[in-house]
């Protein structure tokens, strides 16, 4: 997909605060510090559109980004050991689950896992919840540039064993090398079908 435009729209604290469901939505979820914001910036070929931080847990709302005025990306709050007040963390689960369960325009969740870490209890609970709710899920393994090629195979096999997902369903991704960029866009495009989204394949650059 050619990304002609990408802009931040709103940070919503609840489902009721989300924009009208006029466009299909792709949500991005994962443990805090898994590289969600960096991955979305990479997909959109924009530096700094989605704020990144070395402090886990900075994303605390449902952050909406409009793509080509026909699609929303939604950056969800991370789960796990986030450095945020307990009162804030306790609001995340009902906020995120309320969104995922109640948003009719949601087409799929891009679910991120760190290649260097075994899936945590929170990861597996989140996957179980997605499966029970029958929400289409695109599993992506991030930060693969942090391990060697031989280590990558072992890490993917370990993640596959822990999650019960076939290795071939895991999309390895690197923000630095952009490996997995085209593959992830293809999976997102498939999830959007049969919605009428302009593809403009063979070029994924941003045109201002």
Image (cartoon, rainbow, N blue to C red):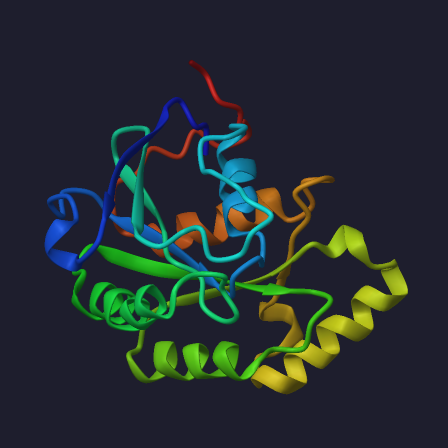
Of residues 32 and 126, the one nearer the viewer is: 32
* Residue 131 higher or lower than 72, as above or below: below
Q: Residue at x 38, y 58 (%)?
A: 77
Q: Report x, y in % for residue 148.
A: 87, 59
Q: Is 173 situated above or below 109? A: above
Quadrant in which the C terminus is drawn: top left
Image point 37% across, 23% down: which residue?
Answer: 5
Q: Nearer the viewer, residue 52 or 19?
A: 52
Residue furthest to the top in view is 208
Q: What percent of the width, then of the height, locates residue 90?
A: 31, 72
In which quarter of the view is residue 196 placed? top left
Residue at 73% in and 78% down: 157
- Above/below status of 10 relative to 186: above
Left or right: 83, with 113 as reference point: left
Q: In the image, residue 104 lies at what x, y percent?
A: 16, 60
Q: Nearer the viewer, residue 89 or 162?
A: 89
């Amino acid at each position: 997909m050619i990304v002609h435009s990408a802009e931040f729209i709103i940070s919503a604290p609840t489902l009721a605060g989300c924009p009208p469901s006029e466009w299909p939505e792709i949500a991005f979820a994962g443990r805090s510090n898994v590289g969600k914001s960096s991955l979305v910036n990479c997909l959109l070929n924009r530096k700094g559109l989605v704020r990144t931080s070395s402090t886990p847990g900075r994303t605390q709302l449902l952050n909406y980004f409009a793509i080509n005025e026909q699609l929303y990306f939604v950056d969800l709050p991370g789960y796990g050991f986030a450095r945020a007040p307990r009162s804030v963390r306790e609001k995340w689960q009902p906020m995120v689950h309320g969104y995922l369960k109640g948003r009719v325009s949601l087409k799929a969740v891009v679910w991120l896992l760190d290649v260097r870490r075994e899936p945590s209890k929170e990861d597996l609970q989140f996957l179980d919840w997605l499966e029970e709710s029958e929400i289409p899920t695109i599993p992506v393994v991030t930060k693969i540039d942090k391990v060697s090629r031989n280590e990558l195979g072992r890490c993917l096999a370990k993640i596959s064993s822990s999650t019960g997902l076939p290795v071939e369903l895991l999309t390895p991704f690197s923000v630095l090398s952009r490996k997995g960029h085209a593959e992830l866009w293809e999976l997102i495009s498939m999830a959007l079908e049969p919605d009428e989204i302009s593809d403009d394949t063979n070029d994924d650059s941003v045109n201002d």
